[in-house]
Amino acid sequence: MHTESITLQVNSLPRFLKPCPRCKHPYYENSGCFRVNANGKRLDIWLICRCEHCKTIWNLSVYERIDRTKLQTEQYDAYLRNDQALILRHVFDPAFLQKNRAELDCEGIAIQPVGTIPPEGTAAQILATSDYSLPLPTGRVIALLLNVSLSRVRRMHSDGTLLFNGDLRTTKAAKAFSFTLLDDWKR
Ligand SMILES: [Zn+2]
């Protein structure tokens, strides 16, 4: 059986589940911008988010009072130019989310798969990887990859044409996971 590698790309900045204290709207959007404050040798860096509706600002702490020399020039520049990959690395970092009591809107995370799923009936092991620790249930990502419904994925799993070593509902895709399609798999 051969292995197909699929890359899961994230092409947009996910929003956060957070009720706005001012207008009660349930989501904050990611502005795509860092705020960098220098105070002598010390730096504060935040990721700026804002209520989707009334634009109330919510700053998520990236670094507080960090010694400027602790950051490499390249990394510092990436903050100054609001590098999108760097933003994504932070927003998918569980420690960053926990520190800021932030929760991603998982329903709204848009994944773009790059790679080839074999045709129906062709057995393959599929290895899906991402640069980021994706908090999405594996079942949902498999449904996206196969272009079928989540209930179809569950049926394939229970009838044994799709093998997955984990719980489709609760195991997170994270940075990598794999599943196997057997010879008689059908959409
Ligand atoms: Zn608001």
Image: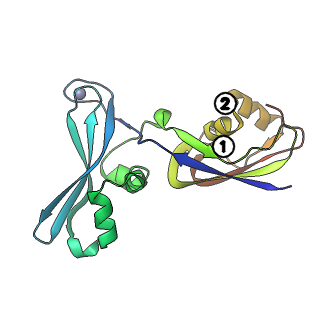
Q: Residue at x 44, y 41 (%)?
A: 12
> Does residue 90 sit above or below 14 in this rendering?
below
> Does residue 58 sit above or below 19 in this rendering?
below
Label 1: which secondary element: loop
Real-space CA distance between mark 2 and mark 1, rounded to the nearest whole angstrom: 13 Å
Picture coordinates of residue 175, whole percent (x, y):
56, 55
The residue to which callout 1 is attached is 167
Label 2: which secondary element: helix
Q: Does label 2 point to a residue whose CB lies under 8 Å from ligand 1?
A: no
Q: Does label 1 point to a residue whose CB lies under 8 Å from ligand 1?
A: no
Q: At label 2, which amino acid type do we have? A: Leu
Which circle, 2 or 1, is nearer the viewer?
2
- In the depicted view, which residue is nearer to us: 73 or 50? 73
Q: Residue at x 20, y 38 (%)?
A: 57
The residue to which callout 2 is attached is 150
Mark 2: few/some/many CA within 10 Å (<14, 14-19, 20+): some
Picture coordinates of residue 178, whole percent (x, y):
70, 52
Q: Residue at x 67, y 35 (%)?
A: 143
What label sits on residue 3 in the rendered view?
none
Q: Residue at x 49, y 33 (%)?
A: 107
In which quadrant of this rendering is ligand 1 seen?
Answer: top left
- In the depicted view, which residue is nearer to us: 37 or 78? 78
Q: Quadrant of the N terminus?
A: bottom right
Picture coordinates of residue 126, whole percent (x, y):
73, 50
Mark 1: few/some/many CA within 10 Å (<14, 14-19, 20+): few
Instruction: Give the image quarter of residue 90.
Output: bottom left
Q: At label 1, which amino acid type do we have? A: Asp
> Does residue 112 sit above or below 51 in this rendering?
below
